[in-house]
Every structure is written in structure tokens, then in C-alpha cells.
Image (cartoon, rainbow, N blue to C red):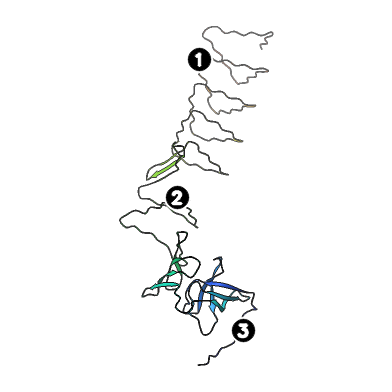
Amino acid sequence: MPHTATIVSLPAMATAIEPAIVMGNCDPHGNIRVCRPGGSIDRDARLAVLPRPELEPGDEVLTMTDGSGRAYIVGVLSCKTGNTSRSEQIRLANGAYARVDRSLADESLKLYSKENELLIDYHSPTGTVKVNVASGNLEFTATNGSIVFHSAKDIHMDGDHVAVNARNDIHMGVRDPNGGAGPVIAMNARKLQLASPVMELIAQRAQLFLQETRIAGKQLIGRFGNIQSISRKFESVADTVMTKAKNVYRTVSELSQLKAGRQRTLIEKTSHMKAQKTIMKSEQDFKIKAEKIHLG
């Protein structure tokens, strides 16, 4: 029976003609998932060959891309012939299917949705399992058990929003390869605890709001360009206090009191004291010694 064809003009002239590998079956709209040799870029291509061949994943076809980026399959380079079976397929009632693909240089097990979307790809030579969710969500649920991830190497998490919530507590730690204690972060409903041999915090700006603060340590070293402290009451207890400054200015609106067992003031140049009223009292001796003493 002769076939008829209708010539349809493309939106723009073809920009690329290149081979591609079929990655899935043809959907009801005539689109097939293909990728460039080597698995670089996946895309949908419209089948433009009549009569339509029975293409399977692994077949090599010739694709043409028009000026708008739409891809078409315009030829078949290699496909299944005779009784050569390259894949085994199990299909469910809703259209989803699993396929053992032996068409490529290696062997793999693939699970497709009813829309021909690749969901799970098990690559046999490398042992790699890839879970692909093109549309929808991926959810792990253990109603009466636990979910455990074990990896001999790295575990990466990347997303627009990453949330970790726990009913009881969260514990994160890093093992010290030398057998010592490594950094640990522990959280529960009432407490956050951070323990680390060395802690470093780098930020352009930091804000800390606390109802009560307690700091204990052997040594504190701080270098600041400007320090401003506002408090209702300030208490300091120390065995020895040493302060070095170029200029010191103190303003007390009411009372300034110093109580000491002994007091000694050493001034290299001039000592100037000015007050509206001055009272100096000594229970025993009161000595004034100078080359010249001016009174009045």
C-alpha cells in the first residue's frame, strides 16, 4: 500500500545534523528521548520517519535541529534486526515498565514511568544507581523504622531550601583521624551544645541576643577597632588588672569611689585637680613635700 507524505516547512533552517542514541520509547505524540553519543545532553526529538520504525533504547538515529531548537529524527543509522534481542522488558498495567538494556557497550537496568521518563538507572559495570525524578517529588518514608545512609566517600546535599527537623535531638560530629575528640554539635528541645578543640567564626556582621551569658576560660585575647558597651551594671573580679592606653577619659554623673588597701599614683609631668570644694582628711600623718609650695 503506497504511503503519502505532507511537506511541512520548518520554523527556520536546520542548524545541526548529528547522530544520537535513543533513550526511551516513542510517546503518543511521536516524541522520543535521545541523547548525544557519550550521554552528554538529553532532549526530546520528534520522529519524522515513515513508516515509523520500532526504535528501542540504544538505537542510533540521525537527528536534525531547526533554528528554534526543535529536534527531529530524520533517519535510522542502526537498530535491532532479525531475532537479535538486546533488551528484556516488563510492563505494568498503567504503562510503566522496566527494561534490561544490553544495546550499548555495557548492561544496565532502567525503570521508566508511563510517560517514558527515566526513573531509576542501574549501571551494571560501575554499580552506579541513579534515581531521576523529572517531575514530582521524591519521598522516603519509614513508618515504623529508621532510614540510614552509609557512604564510604562523600555525601552531598544541594537544594533551594534544606530543612532538618527532629522530635527529640540532633547530633552531628566529625571523627578525629588521630583518635582524639573531634567537633560535635548536639541539639535538643532545650539546649544547643557545641564542643570543638578549635572554633573559628568569620563574619562581616554578627548579632547575639542573650538573656544570660557566662564565659569561662584561661586566656582571652581580643583586637578591636572600636568597642561600645551599654549596660545597667558592670562588675569585674580579677587578681590583677593592667590597662595601657594613650588617653583615658571617664565621665561620672554622680559618685566615683575608690576603695583600696594602698594607693600610689605616678605622674611624669603635671597633675591637675579642680573641684568646687575639696576636703582631704588623714587619720594619722599628712605630708606634703616639694621644692616650692604656694598656698592662697
Q: Is residue 109 shown above or below 206?
A: below
Q: Is residue 198 left or right of residue 192?
A: right
Q: Earlier in the sequence, mark 3 or mark 2?
A: 3
Q: Which residue is mark 2?
A: 152
Disc 1, SS: loop
Mark 2: which amino acid? Answer: Ala
User: Residue 155 versus residue 255: which sits nearer the camera?
Assistant: 155
Q: Which residue is mark 3?
A: 9
Q: Is residue 66 shown above or below 111?
A: below
**Cα–Cα span, label 1 and label 2:** 66 Å
| Residue 39 x, y percent position in the rendering | 54, 66
**Cα–Cα span, label 3 and label 1:** 104 Å
Q: Earlier in the sequence, mark 1 or mark 2?
A: 2
Disc assigned to residue 261 = 1
| Residue 128 x, y percent position in the rendering | 46, 59
**Cα–Cα span, label 3 and label 2:** 55 Å
| Residue 59 x, y percent position in the rendering | 51, 74
Identify the residue at horizontal 47%, vertical 61% (top origin). 125
Q: Residue furthest left?
A: 144
For the C terminus, give its image quadrant: top right
